[in-house]
Structures are given as C-alpha cells and as structure tokens.
C-alpha cells in the first residue's frame, strides 16, 4: 500500500485559522482583506526576505537570532525595512493579540521591496517603501511527523554557489526549493534531500538535515544551506552537553548507513527521518539521540521564554 505523503510543515487542523487577522503595512485586517498589489516586488519577482517564528507563552522564541538573520539579509540586498527590531516585535505582538494567541502559534513575517511603478525588474522602480506582512496562525505540528518520520528522496536539484544566489538568504525566491520538492514527490517521497555543488549531502528543500553515526551528530558545513536558527541551536546544544558534533562534508554513503537522521526547523523543531531513497533509517521514528536533542531543545526554548519575560519586565 502506498503511504500518504506528508511534509515537515504539516499542522494539526485548526478551524480558527479560517478567521484570523493579518498584519499588512500597518493595518491588522481580516484574512479575506489581507492583500497586496500585483505590482508588489515580492509577487512579481520574489524580491524580499522572510522569517518564520513560533510563539511560546507570549514570547517569540529566539527573536534576536531571527532578527539578526533578517536584518543582515535585508542589508545585503539593500532592502530598507523602515522598522527597528522592537517595531517588528510590537507588530507581531499586536497581530497575535488580535487573534487571541499566546502559544502554539506560528508566524511568517514577510518583507518585500514594495510596490513597483512598472512591471520590470530594476529595484529603483519600487518607489513607495517596503511591504510588510505578518501571518500568524494557530499551529501545532502534526503528531504523524513524530510517529512515522519523513521519507526523503535525493533530488537532482542542488543548493548552488553563493555567487549565483546565496542559499543563506531566506528569500521569497524559493523556486529552487519548490523544484526540489516536486522532484521528491514525483519520486514517491515526502521531501527532497538536496546535495551541494560538489555532491555532498546538504539540506532538504524545507529544513536542515542531520545524521547520527556512532553517537556523533553530523550536519553539512553550512556553506550551501540556509543557516537555520534551529540548526544552530542543535549544534550549540550538542557542544554544551558533551555530544560530539561535526559540520563537515559527507556523502550519501554515510547518510544511508546512519543510525538516525532528523530535520531541524522553526516549525517542527526536530523531525525524524524514516527513510532516504527507500532505505530505512533507524527505527523510522525518533531515535534516542533525536529524542535527547528534542528534550534539550524544549528546555532551551523554555529558558529563552523566561529570559525574554525577565528582560521585558
């Protein structure tokens, strides 16, 4: 029997999301009124950056880390957000409050170069400042993600060199990853395992990728992947808790023979990998190392929430 496809972003169904309110350029409006111009540079060209964040007990986990990435990315592409960090925190808080959200919520914050005067590429045609949108949904990862794991297929689409489009950008231009996802689904898997330009294991189309071999945690060098906030937290947790961790080049040979494999991302935290290219990995669910890191990460989130509460009085 063919197994139903799922992804690392599958969430438990929540009918409250049918009537959420969304932040659009200073206004918080009903979902069916949350629109931007067809001339917007994000819609027209994928010219923008975004961040995904989770709300835990009234705080956006690792907010400063997400803002570091957002502001660094926007600076690199000369996109003036026109807002400071606390302005962004305020608009996120107001949007969550308008929806009665305190925890188990996920935000996609999107910043584009804004509306263009003409439907052409040049950035100078965006004359009216950035477009800022925040979608905050009631969102809990589906339990099936932890029960049966994700099936990966190695895909021909690669994460490219920094001098083409640097994969460290969390940009609106996601076609590379969309193609990889399509290739994986057409191969009968849930998501695509993408290699780097040299053929080493890199990342998936949606999340960062880790393997466990002989009690050691391995991930890619980080040169060709989104340097995820959750990815870095897992690396830091390993180092702080005496778990050998390596950012290194490794091939599919090592990945196929892994004791465990898991994905990291803001939404799903640590999601187990059940198989790669039809080859089973471990038990198919979360192995002992994945479970240990999941518990450590949960504690780290709770600690970060307390620190933010304390800092904000």
Image: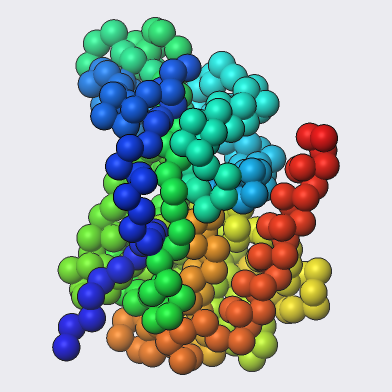
For the question of whether residue 162 can be seen, the reply is no
Q: Which residue is rendered at x = 45% and y = 32% of the image?
A: 134
Q: Quadrant of the N terminus?
A: bottom left
Q: Which residue is rendered at x = 49% and y = 31% of the image?
A: 98
State the residue in front, 124 or 43.
43
Where residue 189 sits, quadrant-wise, is bottom left
Q: Is 100 positioned to the left or the right of 29 in the image?
A: right
Q: Position of residue 231 (x, y in %)?
A: 60, 60
Q: Is 112 positioned to the left or the right of 209 in the image?
A: left
Q: In the image, is residue 124 above or below residue 168?
A: above
Q: Position of residue 235 (x, y in %)?
A: 68, 65
Here the colouring is rainbow
State the residue in front, 262 or 268.
268
Q: In the image, is residue 27 above or below residue 65?
A: above
Where residue 211 sits, quadrant-wise, is bottom right
Q: Quadrant of the C terminus?
A: top right
Q: Which residue is rendered at x = 77% and y = 42% of the image?
A: 309
State the residue in front, 195 or 184.
184
Q: Which residue is rendered at x = 67% and y = 73% of the image?
A: 295
Q: In the image, is residue 51 above or below residue 120?
A: below
State the residue in front, 152 or 21.
21
Q: Is 49 positioned to the left or the right of 279 in the image?
A: right
Q: Is 257 positioned to the left or the right of 305 in the image?
A: left
For the question of whether residue 55 can be seen, the reply is yes
Count of marks, rendered view? 0
Q: Position of residue 53 (x, y in %)?
A: 54, 46
Q: Position of residue 300 (x, y in %)?
A: 72, 61
């Amino acid at each position: 029997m063919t197994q139903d496809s799922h992804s690392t972003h599958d969430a438990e169904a929540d009918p409250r999301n049918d009537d959420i309110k969304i932040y659009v350029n200073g206004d918080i409006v009903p979902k069916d009124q949350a629109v931007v111009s067809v001339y917007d540079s994000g819609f027209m060209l994928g010219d923008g950056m975004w961040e995904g964040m989770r709300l835990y007990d009234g705080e956006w986990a690792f907010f400063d880390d997400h803002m570091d990435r957002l502001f660094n990315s926007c600076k690199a592409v000369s996109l003036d957000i026109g807002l400071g960090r606390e302005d962004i925190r305020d608009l996120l808080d107001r949007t969550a409050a308008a929806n009665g959200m305190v925890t188990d919520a996920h935000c996609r914050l999107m910043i584009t170069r804004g509306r263009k005067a003409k439907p052409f590429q040049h950035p100078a045609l965006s004359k009216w400042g950035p477009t800022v949108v925040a979608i905050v949904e009631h969102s809990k990862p589906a339990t099936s993600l932890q029960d049966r794991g994700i099936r990966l297929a190695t895909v021909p689409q690669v994460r490219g060199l920094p001098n083409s489009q640097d994969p460290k950008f969390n940009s609106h231009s996601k076609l590379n990853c969309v193609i990889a996802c399509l290739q994986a689904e057409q191969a009968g898997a849930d998501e695509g395992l993408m290699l780097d330009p040299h053929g080493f294991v890199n990342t998936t189309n949606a999340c960062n990728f880790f393997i466990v071999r002989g009690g050691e945690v391995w991930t890619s060098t980080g040169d060709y992947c989104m340097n995820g906030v959750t990815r870095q937290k897992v690396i830091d947790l390993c180092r702080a808790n005496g778990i050998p961790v390596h950012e290194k080049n490794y091939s599919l040979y090592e990945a196929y023979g892994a004791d465990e494999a898991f994905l990291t991302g803001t939404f799903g935290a640590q999601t187990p990998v059940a198989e790669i290219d039809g080859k089973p990995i471990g038990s198919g669910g979360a192995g002992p190392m994945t479970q240990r890191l999941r518990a450590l990460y949960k504690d780290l989130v709770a600690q970060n929430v307390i620190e933010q509460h304390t800092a904000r009085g």
